[in-house]
Image (spheres, rainbow, N blue to C red):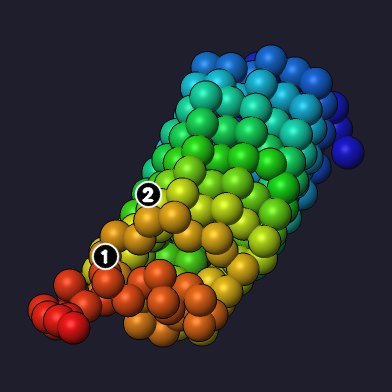
Amino acid sequence: MLSGDAYDLEPDADLDGFTFRGLDLSGRDATRARFLECAVDDCDLEGVTLDGARLLDTTWRAVRAGAVAAPSSTWRDVTLTDVRIGALSAFGSTWTRATVTGGKIDYLDLRESTVEELRLEGVTLGDLDLSHARVRRLVVVDCDVRRLDTTAARLAECDLRGARLRAVEGVGGLGGARVTSDQLLDLAPLLARHVGLVVED
């Protein structure tokens, strides 16, 4: 693999087999860039712009950032491990065969995105925003999720049993998800309110 530096991140860059290790990449603009078989390891990504970027067969490990902007981006066969990101704004993006393991993301914004096979394992999530998204084969394993938003989402074959949910918005969009009986009990008041059910003893 080739050793990359901050100046390799630029609009429309075509990056094939690059490794970025231990670098300050903050503020770089990689709009519409293509990353193929790249590795980003222990880098500062604060304020990096990935609008319309394509990340293919690429790994991120131990990266950190307050905010990363990646609207309309493509994530295919990617792995994110032990990342610490305040806000990953990837609304309108496409995720295919992606895995996020460990670490913390305060706000994972996948609004209006298309997700096909996404595995979240051992991640601490502040907000997971799936509103207006089409999601198929999302698997959540051993994750804390402070807030899940499925407003107007379309879910299929989604397994949320491994999510410790604190708050859910848009419960009407949960159709197609698998939950535990304990999770169902926690969701019961929200579901009742959604369908206008009056519960009286």
- Residue at position x 48%, y 60% from top? 165
Instruction: Where is residue 168? Give x, y as percent.
Output: 35, 60
Drawn side of residue 39 relative to residue 104, left or right = right
Instruction: Where is residue 36? Give x, y as percent.
Output: 70, 48
Quarter of the image where the C terminus is located: bottom left
Circle 2 sits in a helix, a strand or a loop, which is it? loop
Residue 87 versus residue 143 in the image, above or below = above
Question: Residue 154 appears in which quarter of the rendering?
Answer: bottom left
In the depicted view, which residue is nearer to us: 147 or 175?
Answer: 147
Instruction: Where is residue 128? Give x, y as percent.
Output: 44, 52
Circle 1 sits in a helix, a strand or a loop, which is it? loop
Q: Give the foreground label among 1 and 2.
A: 1
Residue 91 versus residue 184 in the image, above or below = above
For disc 2, the marked residue is: 91
Instruction: Give the CA separation, mark 1 to mark 2.
Output: 17 Å
Q: Circle 2: is it few (<14), some (14-19), or many (20+) Cα within 10 Å? A: many
In the depicted view, which residue is nearer to us: 125 or 76?
Answer: 125
Q: Amino acid at mark 1?
A: Gly
- Residue at position x 26%, y 65% from top? 170
Q: Amino acid at mark 2?
A: Phe
Q: How many marks?
A: 2
Quarter of the image where the N terminus is located: top right
Instruction: Where is residue 184? Give x, y as percent.
Output: 43, 78
- Residue at position x 56%, y 40% from top? 105
Drawn side of residue 78 relative to residue 75, left or right = right
For disc 1, the marked residue is: 170
Decide which of tag 1 and tag 2 comes sooner along the chain.
2
Q: Is residue 46 visible?
A: yes
- Residue at position x 64%, y 50% from top? 123
